[in-house]
Image: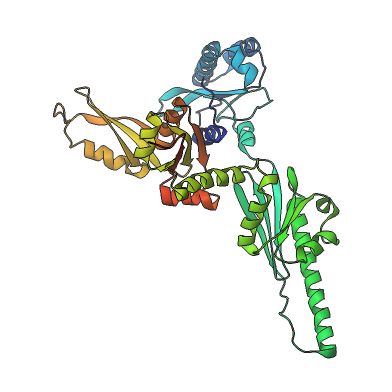
Amino acid sequence: MSISKSKSLERYKTRKLLEELAEKRGYGTELISLYIPQGKQISDVQNYLKQEYGTAENIKSKTTRKNVKSAITTLQQRLKIIPQSVINEHSIVLFAGAIPTNGQQTVMEFYPIVPPEPINTYLYRCASEFVLGPLLDVLEEKDTYGLIVIDRSAAYVATLKGNRLEIHKRLTSGVHGKHRAGGQSQRRFERVIEQQVHEFLVRVGEGAGEIYLEIPDFKGLFVGGPGPTKETFINKDYLDYRLKENVLGSEDLSYSEEQGLKELISKIEPKISDVRYVEEKKLVQQFLSHLAKDTGKAIYGEKEIRNYLEQGAVAILLLSEALDIIRVKISCGSCDYTIEKTIRVGEINKLKESLTVEECPDCTSSLLSIAETKPLLEDLAELAETAGTRVEVISNETEEGSELWNAFKGIAGILRYTPS
């Protein structure tokens, strides 16, 4: 069982597999989920499975009894080849069960997963579907930061969690522009304005409390804006005292609203460098910087990336999680002819139809067929890991992530050295 060195790639693969597992159902309660925490003795797990095998004899349904016993046997056999040293360093999750295919036919399937973060729960469950909750909890980014961009006219209340920036509230003050009249009328007008600003800041504070105080893993709040309103908002009693005590910083900004949020994130990057949103921005910006400076280290496109990966020259490989492309291996049933193509997922059926009327270029037979398919992201990632290349899966949540997908088709890299 291989352990991926790239946490973002590990998370991506686990998410994709969980999406697949969530669709699987058994005829009865015959799909087994086994969560083994780090440090658990394999011998203890094997003894437990032996007991469950005996208990399965009491299942009334002959088919369910047979499938449960087969699933337990599969787990027992697979555990025999997992070294105790692996369990000492990692949690492991195993899924096994008879999955219906066509009609009444079932196929025994087995899925091993090494979670990207430790799972401390020991769990054995036999059900009509796989138990995915603990794994989904591990994949969910928990640390959340609050972001507020505010001036006299408007406020944006947002959260930054993992690679996702989410705007929860857009509030406007309705404050009028400056009044040119003088005298008593001017002073009365200013009092009205100040009352409107006060009521607006109260609403922003209440909105922030409704959002942030309900977040279990709230790390703290950053407030920014282009004027003095942010200091008034922080220093006076507009924020709940629990949030006021948790303000991590105040930043002067050139912009407000959504542009201000982006500027605020850029200014606080050193304080939240471990947040995935910031990590992804920096990775893509590093690639774009090499491209702009024409250092020769920035490369993109499948053909060029594959070429440099095979040479072991790529230091960092950036792959967009939006990649909807697969690598297809076509082979001939009469000879040794094989060829690989890269196509979009939606083109697979069209390719199958075309192969029914094509001849093999080597033996002219009409027995060409698709022998293997693999997501291009995983294909390139495997090649990269073989070459010792760092693999980073980039979301589309940031402006840079969208640019990686839209401008570079989701495939880019930074070389270890400048090509001669």
Viewer-closest of 175 and 301: 301
Q: Quadrant of residue 119?
A: top right
Q: In which quarter of the image is residue 94?
A: top right
Q: Whole-percent x and y of residue 180?
A: 74, 87
Which residue lies at the image location 45% right of the left edge and 39% below the top edge? 413
Number of numbered callouts drawn: 0
Q: Whole-percent x and y of residue 102?
A: 38, 30
Depicted 203 relative to depicted 334: above or below: below
* Residue 209 as seen in the image, left or right of residue 132: right
Which residue lies at the image location 40% right of the left edge and 32% below the top edge? 309
Depicted 23 relative to depicted 397: above or below: above
* Residue 206 as seen in the image, left or right of residue 68: right
* Residue 377 as seen in the image, left or right of residue 360: right
Task: Give the color scheme: rainbow, by chain, secondary structure or one colour.
Answer: rainbow
Res 102 visible: no
Depicted 28 relative to depicted 41: above or below: below
